[in-house]
């Protein structure tokens, strides 16, 4: 989810929460996750009408 949020062009930063050190590591690693075009399309399809992309 965080990888998808970070790839949105209107997003300059994401506010994340962590209660354990390993969660901080996982959240930082999300910036390097490459989502496939199929995954991105599926997420966008699911969110169509729920989130405005303008």
Image (cartoon, grey):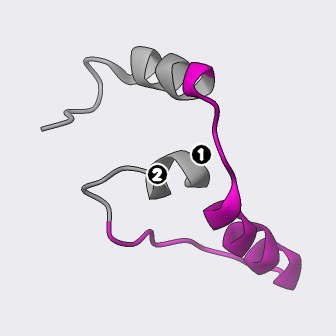
Image height of 53 relative to 1, above or below: above
Name the residue located 69 percent from the left edge and 69 percent from the top edge. Answer: 27
Q: Which residue is mark 2?
A: 5
Give the image location of residue 8, x and y in percent: 37, 50
Q: Are marks 1 and 2 in contact (CB under 8 Å)?
A: yes
Give the image location of residue 18, x and y in percent: 69, 76
Quadrant in which the N terminus is drawn = top right
Is 34 contained in the magenta span? yes
- The quarter of the displayed image where residue 14 is located: bottom left
Is 21 contained in the magenta span? yes
Magenta-drawn segment: 12-38
For label 1, the SS is loop
Give the image location of residue 36, x and y in percent: 64, 31
Image height of 4 relative to 39, above or below: below
Quadrant in which the C terminus is drawn = top left
Indicate left or right for 39 with 46 as reference: right
- Which residue of the protein is positioned furthest toward the right in this rendering? 22
Distance between mark 1 and mark 2 Cα atoms:
6 Å
Q: Residues within 10 Å of mark 1 (few under 14, many from 20)?
A: few
Image height of 10 relative to 52, above or below: below
For label 2, the SS is helix
Indicate left or right for 21 with 47 as reference: right
Q: Say the numbered circle drawn on residue 49.
A: none
Q: Which residue is mark 1?
A: 1
Give the image location of residue 2, x and y in percent: 58, 54
Name the residue located 69 percent from the left edge and 74 percent from the top edge. Answer: 28
Indicate left or right for 14 with 3 as reference: left
Indicate left or right for 18 with 16 as reference: right
- Which residue of the protein is positioned furthest toward the bottom in this rendering? 21
């Amino acid at each position: 989810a965080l990888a998808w949020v970070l790839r949105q062009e209107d997003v300059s930063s994401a506010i994340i929460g962590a209660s354990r050190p390993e969660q901080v590591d996982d959240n930082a690693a999300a910036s390097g996750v490459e989502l496939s075009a199929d995954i991105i399309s599926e997420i966008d399809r699911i969110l169509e009408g729920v989130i405005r992309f303008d």
